[in-house]
Amino acid sequence: MAVATAAAILAALGGVLWLAARRFMGSNVQRLHQGGDSGLMRGKTVLITGANSGLGRATAAELLRLGARVIMGCRDRERAEEAAGQLRREVCPAGGPKSGANSGGVGELVVKELDLASLSSVRSFCQEMLQEEPRLDVLINNAGVFQCPYMKTEDGFEMQFGVNHLGHFLLTNLLLGLLKSSAPSRIVVVSSKLYKYGDINFEDLNSEQNYNKSFCYSRSKLANILFTRELARRLEGTNVTVNVLHPGIVRTNLGRHVHIPLLVRPLFNLVSWAFFKTPEEGAQTSVYLASSPEVEGVSGRYFGDCKEEELLPKAMDESVARKLWDISEVMVGILK
């Protein structure tokens, strides 16, 4: 029995390693700007929410390399400043650029405090942006909460719906004027393939009657897509585009609330190394939608791996999208 078990484990490990080697040798991940125009985003200002770690950090690094002025909107300012320092050293090993500088084609990093679980924080952040920033070329709604235990935001909203949808809904609406005055400009929304398992229950949007952390995450990601499609409709003729994406399965700290049994962790870590995307790989579609001339003028679409993909009918329901928009306006206080 012990020999058979050992053989099965070795076979599984061998399979994982073989598939991992196939993946990396096959180079099936699309690196966008490798050897491309390092100044593609020079002169453009990009705001990324949740930019201090994971996908957001990787997206910030790539856009910084392309010459963008990147504003990191993060809940924890200390961690964001630390991440910004690391990014400056990585992108410019000689030590630059410092905040406010621009050398060698590399852009600038700016850190601003933004807590999407607090509508007052979102409003304060946007007020500061409107006072200090003359333009905003790209807004990337990246930050997210994943399958957390039931908890509420400062304003009493279920955390995943409150941060992933409502916080970004208010942020985007308050910055629309700046985006329009900076047009042509772009909005990029990070969703997930897991939207397929969610639905919009208007009778219990706050999940007070029933809470399932996986379902509620999927609901928030479906809300991201419905929001994107309704916003695209409202932005027709403004030269501001908005698109939504799924990054794939990525190795980030987003899954910190997911419990992996201690005995299974070594195998899980090996499988994630073999099959999950790195943050740099996962960020490529965000970078593509933020910067590529190929999607100039494209709006209201859903992307994965830098290609347009089809949506399920429930993600294209215009009546649900409009109703969700109207209710969200009331929930965040845009309409009384």
Image (cartoon, grey):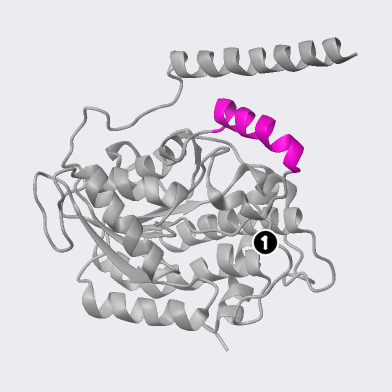
Q: Position of residue 100 (x, y in %)?
A: 14, 63
Mark 1, residue position: 320
Mark 1 Cα-neighbour bin, 10 Å: few <14, some 14–19, many ≥20: some
Residue drawn at (47%, 54%) of the image = 189
Q: Is residue 272 magenta?
A: yes
The picture quadrant where one finds residue 136 is bottom left
As drawn, is 109 to the left or to the right of 205?
Answer: left
Residue drawn at (67%, 42%) of the image = 312
As drawn, is 219 to the left or to the right of 101?
Answer: right
The picture quadrant where one finds residue 174 is bottom left
Q: Is residue 34 above or below residue 301?
A: above
As drawn, is 147 to the left or to the right of 247?
Answer: right
Q: Is residue 310 above or below residue 67?
A: above
Residue drawn at (48%, 50%) of the image = 300
Q: Position of residue 210 (x, y in %)?
A: 84, 67
Helix, strand or loop for disc 1:
helix
Answer yes or no: is residue 307 visible: yes
